[in-house]
Image (tube, grey):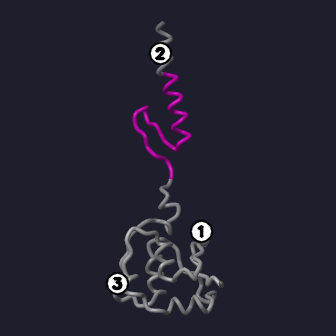
Amino acid sequence: MQFKKSIIPLLALLSASSFANAQNVYIEDGLSLVKVGADSRQEDPISNISSITFPASLITIGQAVNYSLLPTGYDLEDRTKFDPETRTVLMRKIPRTQRKFEYTTIEQVIQALVGNSFAINKDKVSRTISIEYKSN
């Protein structure tokens, strides 16, 4: 009888331990639960939800795009690879309505700045963003 009483908590602990490992959770002394692994915003910083206000010193959309990318570790692709339409939009002035964004991803901010006629592509290896004109 004593054996049956002691085996039940042991089985419960073993099953909880295996379940915890499947969920990337670490159990320390059966008491503490700690999530193991990188946060989603750490794995994909360009998709991090944030708020951004562009300073008055920034004038062009290209400057705003570069400013947006600063905290992410990403850069805009080499300017020699820009198509003429991308160059044109990046040299335009930032619209007054697009000087402040709240609760959006950096990718969404860039998309709003350049417009829906452009595709935003991210290269996770080189950590660069390319902006390409979508021909209709």
Amino acid type at image mark 2: Ser
Q: Does 16 sit above or below residue 134?
A: above
Neighbour tally class for label 1: few under 14, some 14-19, many 20 plus, Cα within 10 Å: few
State yes or no: residue 79 in magenta. no
Q: Where does the magenta region start and end?
A: 10-37
Q: The residue tagged with tag 1: helix, strand or loop?
A: loop
What quarter of the picture does the C terminus occupy? bottom right
Amino acid type at image mark 3: Pro
Residue bearing the label numbered 3: 55
Assess whether mark 3 and mark 2 are in contact (beta carbons under 8 angstroms).
no
Residue bearing the label numbered 2: 6
Residue bearing the label numbered 1: 124
Q: Residue at x 43, y 69 (%)?
A: 104
Q: Left or right: 100 with respect to 69? A: left
State yes or no: residue 22 in magenta. yes
Q: Residue at x 46, y 65 (%)?
A: 48
Question: Sequence order check: which comes first, mark 2 or mark 3?
Answer: 2
- Count of numbered circles on the image: 3
Between the C-alphas of marks 2 and 3, the distance is 66 Å
Amino acid type at image mark 1: Lys
Pinpoint residue 51: horizontal percent, then vertical percent.
38, 71
Q: For the residues carrying marks 3 and 1, which lies nearer the camera in this image?
A: 3
Between the C-alphas of marks 2 and 1, the distance is 51 Å
